[in-house]
Image (cartoon, grey):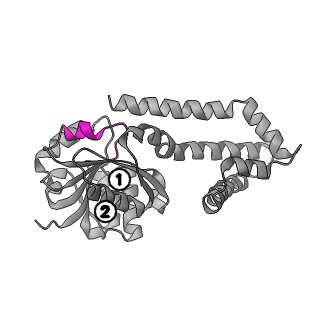
Amino acid sequence: MTRSLTLAVIGGGRMGEAIVSGLIAAGTVARERIAIAEVSEERRADLDAYGVRCVGDGHDIVSDTEIVLFAVKPQVIDAVVVHLAEDIPPGTIVVSIAAGISTARLEGLLPAGTAVVRVMPNTPVIVGQGMAVVSGGSAAGADEVERVRLLFEAVGEAVVLDERHQDAATAISGSGPAYAALFLDALARAGAEQGLPPDVAQALALQMLKGTAELLATTGMRPEELVDAVSSPGGTTVAAIQALEAGGFGSAVSNAVGAAVRRSKELGS
């Protein structure tokens, strides 16, 4: 059966919007081949700006698409999937970006044999710099997993991993943009405390983070090598790193990741 849609997104929140806008900007999926189901009339009005079809109920679109992407919160995904399951025809790829929710759990709510692929993307997909971790369920073949990987690769990077790694991946790349933003804000505030104009402090911190990431990605330099390269004996960087270590910087990061992993597991239980 020929289907008029390539992608039906269930949930028009921030991440659903980010994925749709990123795919359109990349030219990966034509806007007329995308539809979004969103219960909020106000949000639908906002999403109309992308030129995609917007509906209030997913029943109107899931039977006419090749891929159904569930972009709803983990706390409600079971009810949403059950609500639409009977309308999802054989051959449809079901993708979930709900943190902590296993493919096995979703397979139990869908018709037998439905290909389910779990993905953990992050918000930089909106500017084509996302990171997505892709894991196929028991009924998802290599071709179906690869199709989903390519979809997300169009808006950044995408890797296929065994599903047992999803909780850790969620803690690193899924939640990671918030860690980076938190660090940037703290750095900018500290600069302002030292007398820099706040907007200048933020611009310095932002470009530093952007440039450092690009340097590591382009050169293949390991992070510890860059630390050594910047740290002159007895210099400012060494003094700063000693202060970070004394404040428990490494332990705080490790504890944060551990907390995110635990929460991801809790959401799936």
Q: Nearer the viewer, residue 242 or 84?
A: 242
Magenta region: 97-108
Please identify the quadrant where the N terminus is shown: bottom left
Direction from residue 62 to residue 161 in the image, left or right: right
Query: Where residue 66 sits: x, y (%)?
Result: 21, 60
Residue 196 shows in the view: no
Residue 153's tag is none
> Which numbered disc flags the more N-terminal residue, 2 or 1?
1
Q: Nearer the viewer, residue 158 or 67?
A: 158
Asked if disc 2 and disc 1 are in contact, CB closer than 8 Å, the reply is no
Residue 2 sits above or below residue 104 on the image: below
* Secondary structure of residue under mark 2: helix
The picture quadrant where one finds residue 234 is top right
Mark 2 crowd level (few <14, some 14–19, many ≥20, 10 Å Cα): few
Query: Where residue 79 sits: x, y (%)?
Result: 21, 37
Residue sitting farthest toward the right: 234
User: What residue sits right under mark 2 in the picture?
Assistant: 48
Give the residue type that dot 1 points to.
Gly
Direction from residue 111 to residue 266 in the image, left or right: right
Q: Residue at x 66, y 60 (%)?
A: 215
Q: How many numbered marks appear?
A: 2
Residue 16's tag is 1
